[in-house]
Image: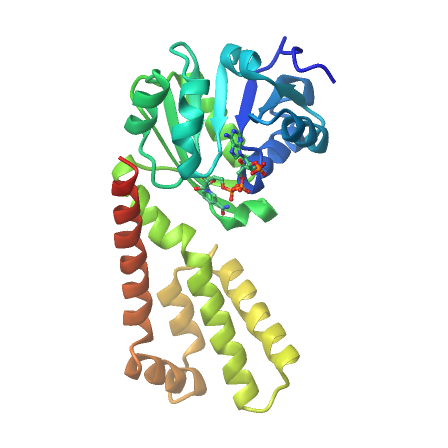
Amino acid sequence: MTTKKKQGIKLAIVGAGKMGGAVLTGALKAGILSASEIGIYHPNSKRREELSKTFNVTPLDDDGIHQAERILISVKPQFFDEVAPLIAHRSASFISLMAGVSATTIAKRVGSLRVVRAMPNLGARLGLSATALAALPQASLDDIELATKLFEAIGTVYQIPEHLFDAFTGLAASGPAFAAIVAEAFADGGVRVGFNRSVAQDLARQVLLATAKLLEHQGPAELKDEVSSAGGTSIAGVKALEKHGVRYGLMEAIEAATIRAKELSQDNH
Ligand SMILES: NC(=O)c1ccc[n+]([C@@H]2O[C@H](COP(=O)([O-])OP(=O)(O)OC[C@H]3O[C@@H](n4cnc5c(N)ncnc54)[C@H](OP(=O)(O)O)[C@@H]3O)[C@@H](O)[C@H]2O)c1
């Protein structure tokens, strides 16, 4: 495939790895863009061809990326310094999903104020990402609309002020790790009361899955109260959780992750 075929490219992807690839796949599946409208840039020509073949889209060389009107930056933040001068383009619009790199920092490096910043999470793998979105005031409505569509194709979009991105990271990006620990602890508890590991893990997953679904229709306190009947088993368990500070521990986990996200963001300024 020729690397010069750039006509009709509406979105150039710089960093078609796990997350960039998920966005690309979601865009194609949802029909937001067609394969012929997407290009992939990689500085290594062999890798560029490989990635483009994987997704069946157009490989873009230095010239191609320079002509792109819209660029999705999905490289690891530590590669941004290397990538920025290559993609810098005053009239282009940028969507970045790099963790911890502010929209203003991106704008300075790429020479355009049309920047939309997104923060997806692991749920993207299943089309269940919770994605935060914030744009600089200079981003156009079209820029924001495309970014919203791209991330709605892999889950749910939350437009939040950028100063809450670290908090979003603490809750929504690190959250799957905390929820996984809860699942693991449920399974350990199940083993302790007599189930084998596999059944205990299955039950833990099923309980969390059903609870997440139920929470689409009612608040968490309401659900807890509904299950906790007078003098019953659940309220006995709730008391044990309170005694061991589980609620406090989870709140602290989200706060600690938020503080760490802030520290990492400051490193990228
Ligand atoms: N994964 C998540 O759950 C998640 C969640 C939120 C945000 N993010 C953000 O998403 C970004 C990507 O993360 P990821 O997990 O998708 O990483 P990844 O799988 O390693 O993907 C990065 C991709 O960038 C390519 N790349 C490296 N240097 C490049 C360059 N100079 N030009 C163009 N492409 C280049 C890599 O190619 P090679 O394979 O050849 O190295 C790889 O395909 C990060 O900034 C991260 O903060 C990720």
Q: Position of residue 53 (x, y in %)?
A: 72, 29
Q: Is residue 91 depicted above or below 58 in this figure?
A: above
Task: Choose between 234 and 100: the one closer to the eye.
Answer: 100
The outermost residue toward the right is: 1
Q: Is residue 98 visible?
A: no
Q: Is residue 50 visible?
A: yes
Total labels: the figure holds 0
Residue depicted at x 55% and y 84%: 190
Residue depicted at x 55% and y 11%: 63
Q: Position of residue 177 (x, y in %)?
A: 45, 61
Q: Position of residue 46 (x, y in %)?
A: 67, 28
Residue depicted at x 52% and y 14%: 68
Q: Is residue 259 depicted above or below 227 in this figure?
A: above
Q: Is residue 218 depicted above or below 193 in this figure?
A: above
Q: Position of residue 48 (x, y in %)?
A: 63, 27
Task: Choose between 33 and 115: the one closer to the eye.
Answer: 115
Q: Is residue 137 left or right of residue 210?
A: left
Quadrant (top left/top right/bottom left/bottom right) for the N terminus: top right
Give the colour scheme shown: rainbow
Residue depicted at x 45% and y 19%: 86
Quadrant (top left/top right/bottom left/bottom right) for the C terminus: top left
